[in-house]
Image (spheres, grey):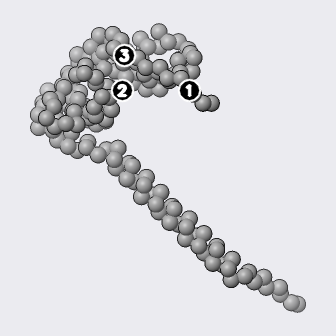
């Protein structure tokens, strides 16, 4: 019996080899890019946490996040020696003052969400996060309204009064 050997031309071997090299290079590039983006998300957290521990009563950091309003702020929540809970807004500019709030003095997220659900029954909730604008601590409520618009409501952390609202409509489907 005779075996048929299929011999590909030498140029196809080089093309396949080159494609494999290109795919591997692209995967390495995407991996490095992804890691750099992930690192940039938490860039500055360590300095903000250190500043909070040095300048406030916080002894242990519970959570750190960032908020981009007019300026970048890091939001650090932590506990004090007497087991109190503080929320500290740390401006990116180290010369600006910290805004410190005792969490017992603000309306809890759950209450804000319940109040929102009563006023917007056919909306699709996304999230509630702390925000700060003009030194006013706020809750940022994001959701889709009845018309399908992306909405960002800002309400006071202290009394729940509306501060600001943005509604965005889709330009393209």
* Quadrant hosting residue 16: bottom right
Query: Which of the two discs, 3 and 2, sits closer to the camera?
Result: 3
Where does label 1 land, which residue?
Answer: 170
On residue 164, the disc is 3
* Mark nearer the N terminus (2 vs 1): 2
Look at the numbered discs 3 and 1 and tell me whether their residues touch, using CB distance below 8 Å: no
Q: Is residue 59 visible?
A: no
* Mark nearer the N terminus (3 vs 2): 2
Residue displayed at 29% across by 46% down: 43
Q: Percent position (x, y) of residue 154?
A: 36, 18
* Residue 173 vs residue 57, the one in the foreground: 173
Where does label 2 land, which residue?
Answer: 129
* Mark nearer the N terminus (3 vs 1): 3
Residue displayed at 56% across by 65% down: 23
* Residue 152 vs residue 84, the one in the foreground: 152
Relative vertical location of residue 58 with respect to residue 25 in this rendering, above or below: above
Q: Is residue 26 visible?
A: yes
Label 2 sits on a secondary structure element that is: strand
Relative vertical location of residue 158 with respect to residue 82 in this rendering, above or below: above
Query: Which of the two discs, 2 and 1, sits closer to the camera?
Result: 1
Label 1 sits on a secondary structure element that is: loop
């Amino acid at each position: 019996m005779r075996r048929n050997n299929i011999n590909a031309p030498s140029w196809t071997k080089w093309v396949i080899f080159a494609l494999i090299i290109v795919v591997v290079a692209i995967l390495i590039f995407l991996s490095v890019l992804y890691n750099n983006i992930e690192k940039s998300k938490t860039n500055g957290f360590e300095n903000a946490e250190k500043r909070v521990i040095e300048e406030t009563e916080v002894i242990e950091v519970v959570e750190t996040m960032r908020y981009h309003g007019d300026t970048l702020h890091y939001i650090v929540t932590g506990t004090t020696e007497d087991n109190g809970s503080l929320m500290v807004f740390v401006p990116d500019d180290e010369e600006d003052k910290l805004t410190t709030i005792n969490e017992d003095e603000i309306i809890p997220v759950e209450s804000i969400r319940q109040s929102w659900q009563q006023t917007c029954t056919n909306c699709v909730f996304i999230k509630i996060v702390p925000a700060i604008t003009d030194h006013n601590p706020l809750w940022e409520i994001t959701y889709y309204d009845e018309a399908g618009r992306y909405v960002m409501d800002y309400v006071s952390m202290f009394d729940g009064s509306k501060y600001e609202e943005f509604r965005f409509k889709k330009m393209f489907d």
